[in-house]
Structure formats: C-alpha cells, structure tokens
Image: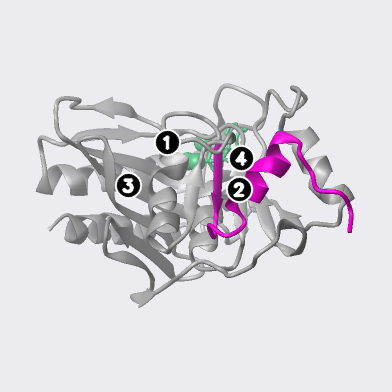
Amino acid sequence: MFKNTLLKALNAAADEITKFNDLDFKISNKEGVNNLVTEVDHASEKIIIETIKDAFPDHYILSEEIGELIQDSQYKWIIDPIDGTVNFAHRIPICCISIGLEHNGKMILGGVYNPFLNEMFLGERGQGATLNDKPISVSKKAVVENACLVTGFPYTYLDEPNGPLEVFDRFIRRGVPVRRLGSAAIDLAWVACGRFDGFYEHKLQAWDSAAGFLLVEEAGGRVTNLKGDEYSPYKPGIVATNGIIHDELVEWVKGNVPKQS
Ligand code: 2AM
Ligand code: CA
Ligand code: CA
Ligand code: CA
C-alpha cells in the first residue's frame, strides 16, 4: 500500500524532471554560496506531495524546499525532490529523487530513483533492497586500503579539526580512491548495490539520507554516525559501509590511520 504510493510519487516526479531534458529551466540561489534550486525541484516536490496527500492526507511530510506539513502523524514522508541539483543544473545525469517513510520514528520504506540512468532503488525494512526489482547486496571488500569510497562536502565547516578536508586528505595521501558524485542519496544507493564499499559525510540533512540509509541496511551493510554510534538522519554525520570495513573506516575518519604496510 505504502510502496504503491512511493512508486507512484517517484515515477510522477521522474516524468516531471525528464520533461526538462531538452528545455531551459529557471535556476535560483538559496542561502549560501552555489546553493541552487531550480524550478524543476519545485515541480518535482509539488507532484510528490500531491501524490502522497492523495493517498494519505493525514501523514506528516518533511520536504527540502517546502519544509514541514501536517506534523501530527505516526507516518512521516521525508522527501528530497532532486538530490544532486548542481549536477541536474549542469545536465550531469547523476541526480535522483529520494523519498523515505518513517513509522513512529523508524524508517520502514525508502526509494531512490535516478531517471537518467533508469535506476530505481527500493528498500523495505526487513524485506531487503532491490535495484530495478532485482535484490542487491553490499560489497565484500575487507580492508579500507583496498576500498573504493565516496563522500561529499558541505559548504561551510570545511576546515574544522577532523573536518571534511582533513579526513579527505588522509585517504588521498594513502592512495585510497574517494569519489565525489554530488548526490548523497545516490552515494548511499551505490553502497547498497556494492559499487562503493563505503561512504562518509560530515553534514547531511534528513532528506539526503532518509531513503538511502535504509537501502544500505537492507542490502546487508551498516550505518552509524561519524563516531561509530547509532545513526539518526536528523543528525549531520554518517558512515555507511558494507559492514566488513565499518569499524576500520570509522577509525580512519577519527584519525586513527593504520601504519603503511
Ligand atoms: P541537493 O542537491 O538536494 O541540494 C551532500 O553532498 C548534499 O549536499 C547533496 O546531496 C546536495 O543535495 C547538497 N548540496 C549541494 N549543494 C549544496 C550547497 N551549496 N549548500 C548546501 N547543500 C548543498
Ligand atoms: Ca538543495
Ligand atoms: Ca539533497
Ligand atoms: Ca534537493
């Protein structure tokens, strides 16, 4: 029942977004440097919220551009109408729609859909995760030194001690590949399907990670905060891995890098 609505919303938003393939769209600046929003983000958000409200008029909605609607419900939809807006604005096909559903504070359903690659990732609590209806699982890579990682950067706090640049520097100096795609939801989905062995980021919002972290957990991976403690999408830091390298990656992020072998 919830899954049908999730799929309907993701598909409707995808139609809205891909309509602009060959069209110009209006790009505006939000607060902060290069913090973009396009008219397509708003169009995607509108159709998603309409679709959810049609099916469940009483549910709580938290969505990036519009904020919070109807807060008094056990069910809460957490929406990023376009994750990777900078990519989208540059017509780089690495962006997605991300929708998570929480029940009494627990994520129960999540979908991340990249309509440009036609990749639909779904995760249901206790039921596993899929990519285009095929079950997916995390990678089997056993050590960080041989891993392929992904991260993202906030636009402030870059230089704080043990902050994004310092941690990034640590991996790059040891030759550990760390990619930067520009969409946290896709980063997480790609950990879930084993393309990446691990992902970490210092400052995310709930809508960036709500669906993606469930995908990773349901694909057999592990998700914590930057210290290795229990994860909450309402707190900024995240480490998401295949589980095998998790404790070691948390140590690298903390600054405890193993001696070069
Ligand atoms: P967005 O495309 O939905 O805004 C983590 O890298 C996240 O940061 C991305 O998923 C992206 O989500 C968001 N982001 C991109 N540019 C940003 C900016 N200038 N300020 C704040 N967040 C940004
Ligand atoms: Ca944004
Ligand atoms: Ca986002
Ligand atoms: Ca967004």
Query: Disc 2 residue type?
Result: Asp
Cα distance in 3D space between marks 3 and 2: 26 Å
* 188 and 10: which is toward the camera: 188
The x, y position of residue 212, in whole percent, is 44, 51
Does label 1 or label 2 sit earlier along the sequence?
A: 1
Q: Determine whether 73 is above or below 193 in the image.
A: above
Q: Give the residue displayed 76% in from the left and 23% down from the top.
A: 161
The x, y position of residue 119, in whole percent, is 45, 69
Write down the quadrant of residue 216 in the picture.
bottom left
Cα distance in 3D space between marks 2 and 4: 16 Å
At mark 1, the secondary structure is loop
Is 83 covered by the magenta stretch? Answer: no
Does label 3 or label 1 sit earlier along the sequence?
A: 3
Quarter holding the N terminus is: bottom left
Q: Are marks 3 and 1 in contact (CB under 8 Å)?
A: yes
Does label 4 or label 1 sit earlier along the sequence?
A: 4
Residue pointed to by mark 4: 201
